[in-house]
Structure formats: structure tokens, C-alpha cells
């Protein structure tokens, strides 16, 4: 007796699938690095929402947060890690598999 193939939705990454985190990953995937303020404005969320969701992605190893200074002004930026890139690419492929299948 053969079993049906598992539906692709089971391969979705729950960390990325949440709408704000999806938006963060999408924005970061298109850039080497983004200033957190630019990221916040691009995805239209509050500082607290962005901070909370970036912390989840950083803990998972998907995003790297860098703190530094531009002159005397503190500056925080975010970028996708290699693991985050792999997870993002896999998540997008799974969405394509669902939409196409």
C-alpha cells in the first residue's frame, strides 16, 4: 500500500511564516544589511514590534544584529545569516510548491 506524499505546508518554517517576521526576512533578503530604522519604516511596524520579532529571528540564528556608531550617533543594523538565507529560500520554495501544486 502506498502512502500519499506529505503536503508541502508541513515544510513551512513557522518562525518565518509569521507576517511581521516574513516581512523582515523579505526586506533583509534583498539587502546586504539594513539600518533598523529603515527596516522599521519599510515594513511599517513600531520599534517595539520590530525589536521583539528581530530578537526571535536572532535567537533562531536567522538574523545578525550589529550595534555601532555613525559618528556619535548609535546605529543598529540587521542582516540575514547563512542559516537565515537557507531557511528563507526553503520557505519561499515551499510557498511556490503549495501555490503551484
Image: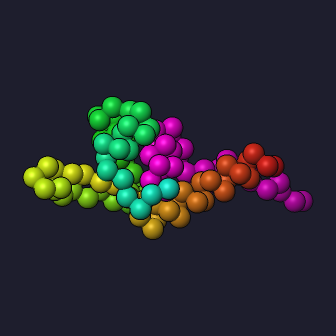
State which region is magenta: 1-29
Image position of 91 (left or right of 74): right
Measured as percent of width and height from the top left, residue 33 is found at: 37, 58
Residue 64, placed above or below residue 52: below
Quadrant assignment for the N terminus:
bottom right
The colour mode here is rainbow
In the visual, does 47 lie left or right of 68? right
In this view, the residue in front, 4 or 69, is 69
Q: Residue visible at 30% across and 42% down?
A: 37
Query: Is 11 left or right of 72, judged from the image as shown?
Result: right
Give residue 73's position: percent from left, percent from top.
14, 49
* Residue 58 visible in the displayed image: no
Residue furthest bottom in the image = 82
Instruction: Name the foreground residue: 88 vs 70.
Output: 70
Where is residue 94 drawn, in percent x and y?
67, 53
Residue 49, by quadrant, is top left
Residue 86 makes an appearance in the image: yes
Q: Residue furthest front?
A: 71
Q: Position of residue 79 (x, y in %)?
A: 38, 58
Establish if 42 lies above or below 2: above
User: Please, what is the dominant secondary structure of the magenta stretch?
Assistant: helix
In the rendered image of this protein, does residue 46 appear above or below residue 86? Answer: above
> In the rendered picture of this protein, how many numbered marks are placed on residues?
0
Residue nearest the viewer, comparing 50 with 1? 50
Of all residues, the one furthest to the left in this rendering is 72
Q: Is residue 27 magenta?
A: yes
* Residue sitting at x 62%, y 53%: 92
- Taking the spot 13% from the left edge, 56% from the top edge, the residue there is 71
Q: Which residue is nearer to you in this view: 66 or 95?
A: 66
Q: Check if residue 101 falls in the magenta segment.
A: no
Amino acid at each position: 500500500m502506498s502512502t500519499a506524499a506529505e503536503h508541502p505546508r508541513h515544510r513551512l518554517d513557522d518562525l518565518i511564516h509569521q507576517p511581521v517576521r516574513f516581512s523582515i526576512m523579505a526586506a533583509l533578503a534583498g539587502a546586504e544589511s539594513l539600518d533598523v530604522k529603515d527596516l522599521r519604516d519599510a515594513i511599517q511596524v513600531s520599534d517595539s514590534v520590530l525589536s521583539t520579532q528581530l530578537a526571535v529571528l536572532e535567537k533562531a540564528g536567522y538574523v545578525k544584529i550589529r550595534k555601532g556608531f555613525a559618528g556619535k550617533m548609535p546605529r543598529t543594523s540587521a542582516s540575514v545569516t547563512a542559516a537565515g538565507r537557507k531557511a528563507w529560500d526553503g520557505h519561499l520554495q515551499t510557498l511556490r510548491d503549495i501555490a503551484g501544486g
